Amino acid sequence: MTAGTRMTTAIVDGDTRGAARPPKLVRFALSRLRIEPRHRLLEIGCGGGTAVAAVAARLTTGHILAIDRSAAAVTRATQRNAEHIARGVAEVRQVDLAQLAVDDGSFDTIFALNVNLFLGPDLSIVAIIRRALRPRGRLVLGYWRRDPRQLVGRAERTSAVLEAGGLPAPVLDWASPEHLFLTTTAR
């Protein structure tokens, strides 16, 4: 490196290997997840596993199950989280949410970041989430878009599907003009 040149780390596609901290959406999500060391969490659409790593680092007796339909994403997430998997606080599976088999009331928190779960009127995904959440369990959905109008439209559509599926209306929480979270609590 020459004098006057500085080295920077870029975050591409959520990849933070070598970066000091996770992307903003994950950082904003962490406080909204209200993670306790004993919690059981499900991440839907884990991608490369950045959020899994941030969550698993906060767990002692708890556990996070991260799922994704993509084999490539599951491979990246598994590699990134090998230490957390080895200590038993994380598991990564290639499975679609519609095919996920878990006991009723398995999770304190279910979350998804930038995942298009509720684009249509199909309420079966909401039913799966309702069954998988323990009573008073939380669903946290986080979205990032440069255009806040897209986030407002997403929030309106998602809220309508969640309510039609039997979950209470979500609370909307703007973490920044480009980051929106929807949170609801199971009855």
Image (cartoon, rainbow, N blue to C red):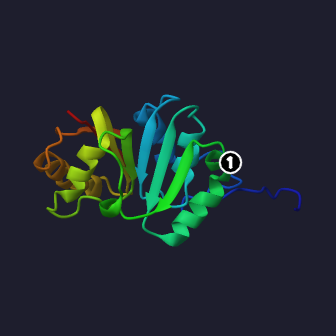
Left or right: 153, with 35 as reference point: left
- Toward the right, the furthest residue is 2
Left or right: 178 in relation to 130: right
Residue nearest the observer in this picture, 19 or 183: 183
Tag 1: residue type? Answer: Glu
Residue lying at 50% horizontally and 30% vertically, measured from the top left? 38
Of 105 and 129, nearer the camera is 105
| Camera-side residue of 145 and 166 | 166
Give the quarter of the image for residue 95.
bottom left
Percent x, y of residue 39: 46, 33
- The residue under the point 14% across, 62% down is 121
Residue drawn at x 24%, y 56% is 125
Q: Nearer the viewer, residue 18 or 131?
A: 131
Residue that carries the numbered disc 1 in the rendered image: 83
Q: Is residue 121 above or below residue 182?
A: below
Asked which secondary structure carries label 1, the reply is: helix
